[in-house]
Amino acid sequence: MKVLLKQDVAKIGKKGQILDVKEGYARNFLIPGGLAVEASGGAMKQIEEEKRASDRHKAKEKEEAQDLAKKIEAVSILLKHKAGEEGRLFGSITSAEVAEALKQKNFNIDKKKIVLEEPIRLVGDYEVKIKLHPEVAAHLNVQVEKI
C-alpha cells in the first residue's frame, strides 16, 4: 500500500515521502496515528502545497536574517570592565553581556545565538559570531576597554 507521510517517522521516512508499506502497518499504525495518509491525488496536492508554503516561509526567514546580519555588522559595541594592570579583566565577558549591549542598540538577539569560543578575558578588540539562521551568521565587532 502506498502512503504519504505527514510527519517524520523514525526508521521509516521523512515528512512528505511516499512509501510502499504493508497494508496492515498502514491501516493499524500509520493512518490511525495521524502519521500518514493513503497516497491519493488529493493528499498529494495538499502535501505539495504545504511544502511550497513551508519553502516560502523558510526563504523569507533567511532573507530577514541576512538583512539583520548586514545591520549588525555595521554596529560596533564598546564594553567597559574593571581590569588589572596587564589588561586582564576581573571576571569575563559572556554572551549574555554582549546580548544586553545589543539590546541597548535596539537589536533583540538571544544570548544563545551569540557564539563565543571562550569568554573574553582580556582588554582589546574581538569579533563575535552571531548565528541568526542555520545558513546566516553575522560578525560583530566588540571592543573591551579598561575602566
Image (cartoon, rainbow, N blue to C red):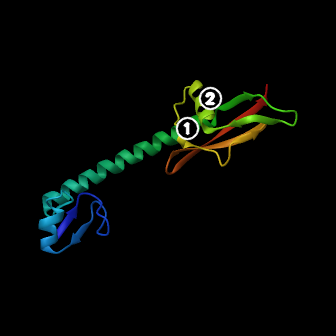
Left or right relative to 129: residue 61: left
SS of the residue at dot 2?
helix
For the point 21% across and 63% down, which residue is it?
4
Q: Marks 2 and 1: CB-CB under 8 Å?
A: no
Few, some or many residues within 10 Å of mark 1 (<14, 14–19, 20+): some
x and y percentages locating residue 29 in the rendered image:
17, 64
In the rendered view, would you say 139 is above or below 23? above
For the point 56% across and 46% down, which residue is it?
137
x and y percentages locating residue 144 in the rendered image:
75, 33
Q: Which numbered disc covers residue 111?
A: 1
Q: Which numbered disc covers residue 138?
A: none
In the rendered view, would you say 138 is above or below 38? above
Q: Which of the two residues, 130 or 74, is positioned nearer the viewer here?
A: 130
SS of the residue at dot 1?
helix
- Which image quadrant is residue 33 in? bottom left
Left or right relative to 80: residue 12: left
Q: Which of the two residues, 53 or 80, is positioned nearer the viewer here?
A: 80
Mark 1: which amino acid? Answer: Lys
- Which image quadrant is residue 25 in? bottom left
Q: Which of the two residues, 136 or 15, is positioned nearer the viewer here?
A: 15
Mark 2: which amino acid? Answer: Ala
For the point 19% across and 54% down, which residue is it?
46
Few, some or many residues within 10 Å of mark 2 (<14, 14–19, 20+): some
x and y percentages locating residue 89 in the rendered image:
77, 35
The N terminus appears in which quarter of the rendering? Answer: bottom left
Q: Which residue is mark 2?
A: 101
For the point 53% across and 47% down, which residue is it?
136
- Which image quadrant is residue 2 in? bottom left
